[in-house]
Image: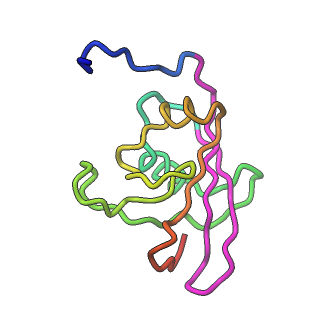
């Protein structure tokens, strides 16, 4: 099948806001906890851009001021893999994971982010 002829599904009725639920920890060995953030929806937003949006104003959906999320990133071009994390239960590069596609697959307006389990989780 010629992939150029396959129509990609699009998010036809996007939400006003997107919830980003992040599994976090303050330091190595500390208990993990989850915080949910709400950001405005923007077309073609990737997960790294969503995290950068949260970093600008780290306030949870409940209005609690918190620390900005911490993650690794380097090339932002889908080459190095350093930004890889568990996104909605799947291991993916956050630079290439588009919010529209994630919401479409999940059928809701929440995206969950977690560290990979095979690497030491120092923070977030």
Residue 46 placement, left or right of 31: left
**Residue 17 found in image quarter:** top right
Q: What is the x, y in percent for residue 83?
A: 37, 59
Query: Which is more toward the observer, 7 or 67?
Result: 7
Q: Residue furthest right?
A: 62
Q: Residue furthest front?
A: 1
**Residue 12 found in image quarter:** top right
The answer to whether residue 114 is above or below residue 120 is above
Q: What is the x, y in percent for residue 121?
A: 51, 77
Image quadrant occupied by the N terminus: top left
Residue stretch rendered in magenta on the structure: 13-39
Residue 123 placement, left or right of 62: left
**Residue in the image at 59% along x and 45% along y:** 111
Q: What is the x, y in percent for residue 99?
A: 49, 37
Query: Which is more toward the observer, 120 or 58?
Result: 120
Image quadrant occupied by the C terminus: bottom right
For the image shown, how many numbered marks are present on the structure? Answer: 0
**Residue in the image at 75% along x and 53% along y:** 63
The answer to whether residue 32 is above or below residue 11 is below
Q: Is residue 8 magenta?
A: no
Q: What is the x, y in percent for residue 55?
A: 51, 57
Residue 48 placement, left or right of 110: left
User: What's the image's color scheme?
Assistant: rainbow
**Residue in the image at 65% along x and 65% along y:** 66
């Amino acid at each position: 099948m010629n992939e150029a002829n396959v129509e990609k599904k699009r998010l036809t009725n996007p939400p006003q806001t997107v919830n980003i639920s992040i599994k976090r920890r303050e330091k190595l060995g500390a208990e993990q906890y989850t915080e949910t953030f709400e950001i405005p929806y923007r077309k073609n937003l990737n997960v790294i851009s969503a995290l950068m949006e949260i970093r600008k104003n780290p306030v949870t959906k409940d209005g609690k001021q918190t620390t900005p999320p911490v993650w690794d990133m380097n090339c932002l071009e889908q080459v190095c893999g350093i930004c890889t994390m568990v996104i909605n239960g799947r291991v993916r590069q956050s630079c290439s994971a588009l919010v529209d596609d994630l919401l479409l697959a999940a059928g809701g307006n929440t995206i969950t982010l977690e560290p990979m389990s095979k690497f030491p989780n120092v923070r977030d």
